[in-house]
Image (tube, rainbow, N blue to C red):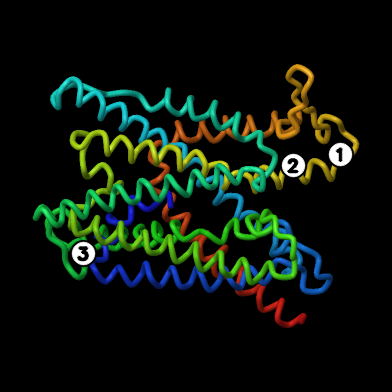
Amino acid sequence: MAGVLSLAWSLAQFGWIGVSALIIFGIITLYTSNLLAECYRCPITAKRNYTYMQAAKANLGGKMYMAYGLAQYSLLIRLTIGYTITAAISMVAIHKSNCFHKKGHEASCEVSHIPYMIGMRVFEIVVSQIPDIGEMWWLSVMATITSSGYASIVAALAFSAVISGHGKRTSLTGVEIGPGITATQKMWRMFRAIGDVMLCSSYSAILIEIQQSRHIKIVSIRNPIMKKVNMISVSTTTLFYLICACFGYAAFGNNAHGNMLTGFGFYEPFWLIDLANIFIVMHLVGAYQVVAQPVFGAVESEMKRRWPRSKFVNAEFLIRIGKKNFNLISINLWRLTWRSMFVVMVNVLAKALPYFNEVLALLGAISYWLLTVYFPVNMYIVQKKNR
């Protein structure tokens, strides 16, 4: 739900008819996610596929799975960069809000994003040592709760602005061509708005990884369970998207901000805006790990395949405190080295590309078509032919 704050801006580009786009993309995501859940097993051997790339290889073969891997992992890496930038922006917003509250609205409260990015880098290096996505359920729960928290706060603030009579002008077709915006700019904004909506709906990119991480004893019912999970997940997120987009557009009209929370300023109620930003940071910390784990797993699996006897790659060292071994905490030298390097690389790219989020929507639209539509449909067709 990291892109939910941009949905009011996206709706402003289309106007109220854009509501149909949110609903349509929600339906498409649900339908193709259910098709993808059917591809959890190889159609010939019935062997489980533990990653989306394994499922693509088992169903499509040839070089198609390589194209899929490029699309999936490039999307996930781009998301980690975007999450790093957005988390730093939210931390800076908290600093500014408290500064303005203490020193007055005219105070100079400028602060650099870099210290906050470095702080996130250190934290993510530590958390990234969790071996796989199945062991970080608590982080996923935290990310889910906090995403619901900040989305609810933003929706409540927007709703309050509307019912108090401070809502701005809206229209059926959104931002109008005229002084300040040309037809070309309007078209580009509409394409970017579609990309934002698609990026919000990129649920399928890690669906197989989520499916294999569920600890369900009766393996034969995984698909029905995953279809229920898909229904609940997609329906809930789509509902949140609609609430935030509609209330945000009604509150700010055609001048809605790219980050809806900034539309409320840094002033009052400062504690509620701070709370929303804290929730955003907590959500992005968890989301970062969820989207990075498939990248970690792919590289580490390949290293173990190439060097099965290497202690540097395979040995796990339990952390001992006193006379007790903490089995939940272990160090692998390759995991420590590789994941730390990845986090540092992402952090450096985030600092070098401060406007990366501007192009993320366009890249997200391309990835959505490949990962959510093209590959799941083609994989399901192969599944049906081999049954």
x%, y% of residue 46?
Answer: 80, 70
How far apart marks 2 and 1 lie (CA) works out to 10 Å
Q: Secondary structure at mark 1?
A: loop
Q: Is residue 175 left or right of residue 4?
A: left
Question: Dots 2 and 3: beta carbons under 8 Å?
Answer: no
Farthest top residue in view = 322
For label 3, the SS is loop
Of pointers 2 and 1, the one earlier in the residue sequence: 2
Could you say which disc has been placed on residue 366 in the image?
A: none
The residue where tag 2 is placed is 300
Could you tell me which secondary element the residue under label 2 belongs to? helix
Q: Which residue is mark 1?
A: 307
Compute the Cα span from label 2 to label 3: 47 Å
- On screen, residue 216 versus residue 168, left or right, reads right
In this rendering, the answer to whether 70 lies above or below 34 is above
Q: Dot 3 corresponds to which residue?
A: 174
